Image: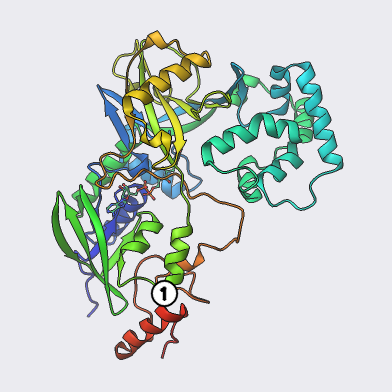
Amino acid sequence: MKQQPSLSNVIVIGGGPAGLTAALALTDHGLRPIVLERSQQVGGIARTESYKGFRFDMGGHRFFSKSGEVRDLWHRILGEHFLRRPRMSRIFYRRKFFHYPLRPLDALAKLGIVEGFLIVLSYLRWQVFPYRDVDTFEQWVTNRFGRRLFLTFFKSYTEKVWGIPCTELKAEWAAQRIKNLTLGSALLSWLFKPRNAITSLIEQFDYPELGPGMMWEAFRREIESHGGVVKLGCDVVEIAVESDRVVGVHVQTNGKAEFIPAEHVISSMPVTEFIKKITPPVPEAAARAASQLKYRDFLTVCLIVDKAELFADNWIYIHEPEVIVGRIQNFKNWSPMMVPDQSKSSLGLEYFCNEGDDLWNTSDAELVELGKRELAQIGLVEARLVEDGCVFRTEELPDRRPQRTAPVQQSGPRHAHRPVRGTQPGPGRDERPVECQRRPGLPRGSERAARRHERTTGCPAKAA
Ligand SMILES: Cc1cc2nc3c(=O)[nH]c(=O)nc-3n(C[C@H](O)[C@H](O)[C@H](O)COP(=O)(O)OP(=O)(O)OC[C@H]3O[C@@H](n4cnc5c(N)ncnc54)[C@H](O)[C@@H]3O)c2cc1C
């Protein structure tokens, strides 16, 4: 007789989009997963925060997927509360709005004739004598647009966001994001395919009416309605492995220690932390590789402004070099329901930083003042119109660890992360999923010796 799947032995670490989606998929197969979430709310980086009835999206989350299955799932879960919204996001520089992604002609028109001429000269110089070896972001963008445009539009913002010199970011990273745009192709398309500038600024995306957290709250309810469990305030402090098989996790819930047995664990917590929490410890090579993965942190200064309309964009990129704010979200333009009083607006000023640096350690009150000052400095909002503010880091987490942005892709060995993919890394073993599992074919008696071998040499023992 076919064995029924066990109904309570799958643990999912993390109640962000990945963890909740995995858990929901498990319920489709008759399983009842337990989701363990460290903070007091679901959604992870894609949560919605609130203050005095105003809602704030930590990052500005567009729901856009090429997968019909994913789109259908989101629509099924949120139904009529999933709005279709227009997108507008531009670059703010020298008190002017520039098209984003950058359109060279739009940029040239706004920068003025002299600067435009210098940019074209620089572009031609780099077309004739480009970098031959293109390894870095700086080289890639310079070859495409010329050095002057790189210095004007790419260098300062990219370095603000990632905290890494453009000479150390990979060229691939630029290629993924800037795609098929060149100054030449933009000129041709302007000459032969004139387009309505306003229409081309606007795309559309889907968005929950109360911010992205609304989606993940609905996922949570759906999981629970199918018998799954979502535990909040539950910090996974250790993942216990015996004989190369996960046996459960140790958690701290409101200061209370508990062991939750499990046969399967799916982790969506940061890989760096996951690897450190496995006991017995993973081989040195995996631990070293995990510790080398780099993340960037950010904090959002949220300001309530006593003005109904500020600017038309959902968010703007701040290229002004004299301020450190990186992007500004205008939440009312994401969804009017993010703001309880339509005579007011709310902004999210995103500051990219690293945990423990000066900005990170600045008090909330000072950060609110900094936000007000910078808004006035670049001529966007008068300070007197800002009536209140707050700051969101990740204070609800017990160890005050910041939210992470995407892992930073630095120029360097392409597959430095590979040993982290399995818990027993080594040649040929680097494509295993992060889920802990027993290596097939090793008889139980030889497990301990195999593990010792792997730990000391970093190489996997051969299956019997
Ligand atoms: C600025 C910014 C803008 C973005 N914009 C978009 C966008 O427009 N569209 C889009 O699709 N994506 C966007 N993203 C990406 C999106 O936020 C992430 O892809 C998504 O949140 C990742 O989900 P996740 O579940 O993998 O991780 P996370 O959201 O990080 O969730 C992980 C969860 O694990 C929990 N956790 C960690 N450690 C433990 C532990 N020890 N015990 C228990 N729980 C733990 C955390 O509290 C967290 O809730 C953006 C990201 C950023 C930073």
Q: Residue furthest front?
A: 358
Query: Which residue occupies 69% across, 32% down?
Result: 151
Q: Quadrant of residue 441?
A: bottom left
Above or below, 64 against 304 in this view is: below
Q: Nearer the viewer, residue 384 or 456?
A: 456
In the displayed structure, 40 sits above or below 319; it is below
Residue, x 47% and y 64% (percent of image)?
289
The answer to which quarter of the image holds residue 422 is bottom left
Tell me: residue 28, above or below residue 355: below
Q: Residue furthest right?
A: 128
Question: Which element type, helix, strand or loop, lies under badge 1?
Answer: loop
**In the rendered view, how is the structure colored?**
rainbow
Q: Is residue 89 left or right of residue 361?
A: right
Residue 421 seen: no
Along the horizontal axis of the image, is 110 left or right of 349? Answer: right
What is the quadrant of the C terminus in the image? bottom left
Q: Position of residue 147 (x, y in %)?
A: 75, 35
On the question of residue 29 being in view, the answer is yes
Along the line of sight, which residue is nearer the eye, 47 or 358? 358
* Depth check, front residue: 98 or 220: 98
Q: Residue 281's spot in the image, x, y percent? A: 34, 71
Residue indicated by mark 1: 424
Q: Amino acid at mark 1?
A: Gln
Image position, residue 309 (x, y; %) = 43, 12
